[in-house]
Amino acid sequence: AFKRHILTKKSTKRKRSLRQDGVVSDANLHFVKRLLGMK
């Protein structure tokens, strides 16, 4: 997320950290599954 546009003002360190995959917490798992149509 947030790495599609306006990359000139973002620092290299910030862009590097945006490469990582996101992790869904257990608290949001049911919500995310519902959004993805998995449940």
Image (cartoon, rainbow, N blue to C red):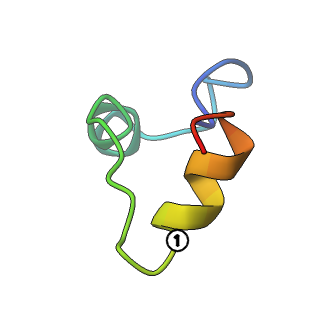
Q: Is mark 1 on a helix, strand or loop?
A: loop
For image coordinates 66% across by 18% down, the residue present is: 4
**Considering depth in this image, is 5 or 22 the residue closer to the camera?**
22
Q: Front-most of 29 and 5?
A: 29
What residue is at 55 percent from the left and 64 percent from the top? 30
Give the residue type at disc 1: Asn
Instruction: Choose top left, top right, bottom left or bottom right for residue 5.
Output: top right
Q: Say which residue label 1 marks.
A: 28
Q: In this view, does 24 lie above or below 25?
A: above
Q: Position of residue 7 (x, y in %)?
A: 61, 24
Q: Position of residue 33 (x, y in %)?
A: 56, 48
Return the x and y of residue 24 as percentages of the image width and height: 39, 58
Farthest residue in the bottom direction? 27
Q: In this view, does 9 lie to the left or right of 11?
A: right
Picture mark count:
1
Crowding at mark 1 (Cα within 10 Å: few <14, some 14-19, many 20+) = few
Q: Which residue lies furthest to the top in this view?
A: 4
User: Against 23, is 5 above or below?
Assistant: above
What is the quadrant of the C terminus in the image? Answer: top right
Location of residue 35 by image quarter: top right
Residue most toward the front?
A: 39
Residue 18 in the figure: left or right of residue 2: left
Q: Which residue is drawn at 26% across and 36% down?
A: 20
Tell me residue 14's x, y (percent): 38, 45
Q: For the N terminus, give its image quadrant.
A: top right
Question: In the figure, is residue 19 to the left or right of 37?
Answer: left
